[in-house]
Image (tube, rainbow, N blue to C red):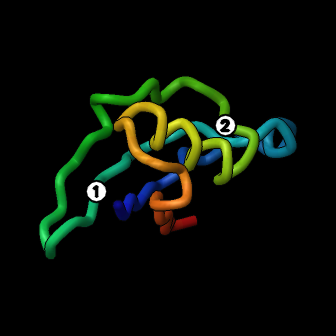
Amino acid sequence: MRFHFIPKPVRAENAAAGFTLDRVWTRDDGHNRDISNLLDQTYMYQSARELQWHLADRFGICAQTVELTFDA
């Protein structure tokens, strides 16, 4: 399953801590569906890999099938 996300801008002093989410949507079968409301947008992710595992767990799919793209 494909997911696209936009991280929220972080202050320079928090950049090493990770990132939070601004928007997240799925890209499946040529359709985009905003799923931002299904995730905690205040959680500080340490890496894109952590987000990958979180999405897999949230949607009950294998982490290896989660494809992430993002806008910095």
What residue is at 54 percent from the left and 50 percent from the top?
63
- Relative placement, left or right, of 53 versus 68 is right
| Number of other residues with Cα within 10 Å of mark 1, as a class: few under 14, some 14 to 19, many 20 or more | some
Looking at this view, is 28 or 60 the one in front? 60
Q: Which residue is mark 2?
A: 45
Question: Which amino acid, by three-letter code, is at mark 1?
Answer: Thr
**Amino acid carrying mark 2 in the image:** Tyr
The part of the image, by quadrant, that contains residue 8 is top right
Q: Is residue 38 above or below residue 19?
A: above
Q: Position of residue 61 (x, y in %)?
A: 40, 45
Q: Residue furthest front?
A: 62
Q: Which residue is mark 1?
A: 26
Q: Is residue 3 left or right of residue 21?
A: left
In the figure, 26 relative to 57: above or below?
A: below
Residue at (37, 48) in percent of width and height:
24
In the image, 63: left or right of 39? Answer: right
In the rendered picture of this protein, how many numbered marks are placed on residues?
2
Question: Circle 1 — which element?
Answer: strand
How many other residues sit within 10 Å of disc 2, few (<14), some (14-19) or many (≥20)? some
- Label 2: element kind: loop
Indicate left or right for 45 with 22 as reference. right
Position of the N terminus, as image quadrant, is: bottom left
Q: Does 9 appear above or below 36?
A: below
Residue drawn at point x = 26 percent, y = 65 percent: 27
Looking at the image, which residue is at 38% across and 58% down? Answer: 3
Q: Position of residue 36 (x, y in %)?
A: 32, 38
- Please identify the quarter of the rendering in which residue 38 is found: top left
N-term mark: 1 or 2: 1
